[in-house]
Image: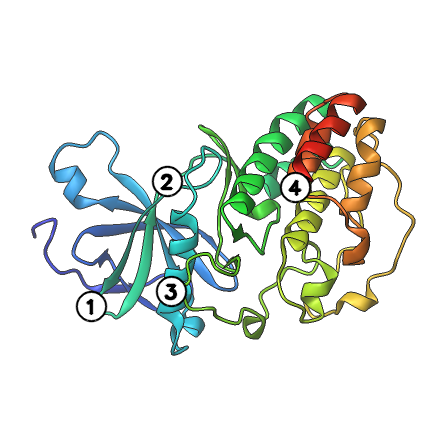
Amino acid sequence: MSAFSPASTSTQAGMGELPEILAGRYRIERLLGAGGMGAVYRARDLLREQFDDPDPCIAVKVLSEVLCESPDASSLLYSEFALTRRLRHDNVVRLHTFEVDTDCQRAFITMELMRGPTLDKLLCERPLGLPWSEVHEIALPLLDALAYAHSRGVLHGDLKPSNVMLSDDGVRLFDFGLGQAEKGVLPGLPHLSRNRFNAWTPAYAAPELLEGEPMTFSADVFAVACVIYELAGGRHPFRRLPSDEVCEERPLVKLRAPKNLPKRCWPVLRRALAFEVSQRTVTVAELREVLGGRSFFELRHWFRAHRR
């Protein structure tokens, strides 16, 4: 059988019948990870392999079988592709193509194959938190990636430890499946309602998202602040909730600074964790500057210059 000849279908970890070879080119090898909206597989690009590419392996993302039944399923996946393609940053996953297998009618995205653990696995291995030097090495590139996305008018929408990878090439932010473009950015892109997919992760979703309010940059601020708090303290700042609980059942508690966070950073991180949007008066860029270690006078000058 030729490498490009049709292959029989096989069941792939709850994803239904998925061809062994997608679009006559990508041979599915194994499942890398799955969530409520889709799954990512390791695959071999047979065309690259035919031309003796030393590293023909890529990652392929497809939507879940349930979402595939939705009339705008392909638009949802293309929206993620268009948003992420807009971002060219060393700490954001690199996407290659958006394609459709005409035989099985499944849309998919091809992307770089990232090698390394996701942040949630690291947190499980380090239940007491990381020393500041390690938090610093992870938090700064993560904030750089998110600040860059915001500067390009892109909201991530689902930032959590399992969507951050510590790859061989550095920190990578990925999975913009719940993301949106700021009004006026990518005007031709369909604005799909993410609320109906009920896919927010309660532990990291800003309270206003769980209450059905529109997504904003401030929601990303809340999520990344939760991640940084967890890195420095070894635990989530708030009680974790089962996925079926609503935001108002999460108790308001008096937060204490995580033990491995420098005191100078706590006031800004605490504001980023505010439940009320009106009190969450900090941007990702400002949070990055504070954690980056600038002095008070440098920060005051920077804030004034960027608020003009």
Which corner quadrant holds the C terminus?
top right
Q: Quadrant of residue 283?
A: top right
Question: How many angstroms separate mark 3 from mark 1 (CA)?
Answer: 24 Å
The residue beneath circle 1 is: 102
Q: Residue at x 77, y 50 (%)?
A: 280
Determine whether, in the image, residue 209 is placed left or right of residue 54.
Answer: right
Q: Nearer the viewer, mark 1 or mark 4?
A: 4
Identify residue type, mark 3. Answer: Gly
On the image, numbered disc 4 is attached to which residue? 284
Q: Is residue 121 left or right of residue 239?
A: left
Could you classify mark 1 by the number of other residues whose Cα lies within 10 Å: few (under 14), some (14-19), or many (20 or more)? few
Q: Earlier in the sequence, mark 4 or mark 3?
A: 3
Query: Which circle's residue, 2 or 4, is located before the other in the chain?
Result: 2
Q: Depth check: give the residue in front, 8 or 33.
A: 33
Percent x, y for residue 14? 42, 66
Disc with the residue nearer the chain's start (1 vs 4): 1
Single out the mark in the foreground, 2 or 4.
Answer: 4
The image quadrant that residue 82 belongs to is: bottom left
Tell me how far mark 4 sits from mark 3, CA to CA: 27 Å
Q: Secondary structure at mark 2?
A: loop
Q: Which mark is residue 113?
A: 2
Q: Residue at x 68, y 32 (%)?
A: 305
* Residue at disc 3, secondary structure: loop
- Dot 3 surroundings within 10 Å: few (below 14), some, or many (20 or more)? few
The numbered dot on residue 188 is: 3
Instruction: Kindly give the residue lying farthest to the left in the view shown.
Output: 2
